[in-house]
Each structure stands twice: as C-alpha cells, then as structure tokens.
Amino acid sequence: MKRRLVLLGPPGSGKGTQGELLAARLGIPTISTGALFRDQMARGTALGVEAQTYIAQGHLVPDRVTNAMVANRLTQADAARGFILDGYPRNVPQVAVLDGILDQAGTPIEAALEMRLDEDLIVSRLLKRAEIEGRADDTEPVIRARLEVYHSQTEPIIDVYRSRGLLVSVDSLGTIEEVSEAVMRALGLEQLDNQ
C-alpha cells in the first residue's frame, strides 16, 4: 500500500481537500508547507521567525528554510508510517533535497498524485472561494499570476516523477466524493473503501 505520497497540482485543483481525505483514510499525516510555516511562526522557532520576515514582505520563503522545516517534520513519529506532502516539493531543486532526506531514512516516495483541472475552471473556482471567504486579494489577475508561478516552477516536477514511473494523474472535475473515489482507484487503494 502506498503511504509516502507527493501531491501535485495548481492552486484550486482540490489537492488540499483530497490530501486531507486520503490522509484520514490511510491514517497518516498531511504535511503542508503552509501549515508548517504557521506552526513554526506561532511557536516562535528560529525557522518560523525567519519565514515570517519573508512572508511579511510578500516573498516566498527560501528553499533553505522550507527544506529544513520539512526535514524536521518528516522525523516526527506520526510520519513513520507514511505521509502526504502538499506544497512540497515546490520546484526541481527541492525534489533533489527531498530525495536525499528520504534516501537517508530508506523511505522513498511511492507515488506522486497529480490533480488536473482546466485553468479557466480553476480561476472560477478560486474566485468563488475568494467571494465566500472574503479574500479581497484573490482577484483574477492575482490568481492567474499564481498559476504562472505554478507552471514555471512546480509543473516541471511532474516530468521528474513521470520519468521515475511514480506519477498518477486524476481529473479533479466532479464532486469531492467523485474525485476522492478516482484518487483511491488511481492509487490502487479502492479496497480500503470495501473494508
């Protein structure tokens, strides 16, 4: 059973929702870089303080800081049985760092789950979410800029995992339940639903 997974997909593709559902079914944690940043900042750790200085200026947290947070999180007891990485790796250099971390532990990634969705659907989905959640800064130009960053920095990771035979792609159009079922089938985990 696949228990060490990377979630890939543009913002608004549903990977956060599906990652949480999958983690609950498998009994493993979802490790999200956003949650890591918030936790470290709330606890006032050295890495959290450093991350806060970049976030406050509207910059991406440097790979060096993100890599250190993820490496630390993967050593925690609840990740020993497996984990789902959401938002990491964000670029090809981070893939190499993650490989090094997991090679040392003898626990390589078993699958990379790509959530696919048409870009115009993503934009409308994120605009609707922004309206519901009162996110005034999530305008169409901002969303499209985030998608461009995804295409240039993160999308190349898909080819890395495809070349390793680890990529599993799922169309994330449909209800949460329909997509969840497609995810389980794609990962060969549908037997969990029958237990």
Image (cartoon, rainbow, N blue to C red):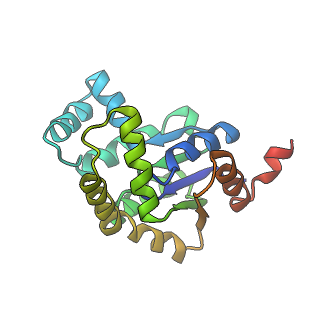
Where 125 falls versus 81 (above or below)? below
Asked if one can make out residue 86 in the rendered structure from this viewpoint, the answer is: yes
The residue shown at (35%, 67%) is 151
Depth order, front residue of 48/121:
121
Q: Is residue 95 left or right of residue 170?
A: left
* Residue 82, horizontal then vertical, whole percent: 60, 45
Looking at this rendering, what residue extends furthest in the bottom direction? Answer: 163
Q: Is residue 30 left or right of residue 140?
A: right
Where 154 falls versus 84 (above or below)? below
Q: Quadrant of the C terminus?
A: top right
Residue 93's quadrant in the figure? bottom left
* Residue 109, horizontal then vertical, whole percent: 55, 58
Residue 186's quadrant in the figure? bottom right
The residue shown at (51%, 50%) is 15
Count of labels in the image: 0
The residue shown at (53%, 40%) is 30
Residue 78's quadrant in the figure? top right
Looking at this rendering, what residue extends furthest in the left direction? Answer: 57
Depth order, front residue of 18/177:
177
The residue shown at (59%, 68%) is 166
Depth order, front residue of 47/16:
16
* Residue 194, horizontal then vertical, whole percent: 86, 45
Looking at this rendering, what residue extends furthest in the right direction? Answer: 195
* Residue 37, horizontal then vertical, whole percent: 32, 36
Asked if one can make out residue 74 in the rendered structure from this viewpoint, the answer is: no
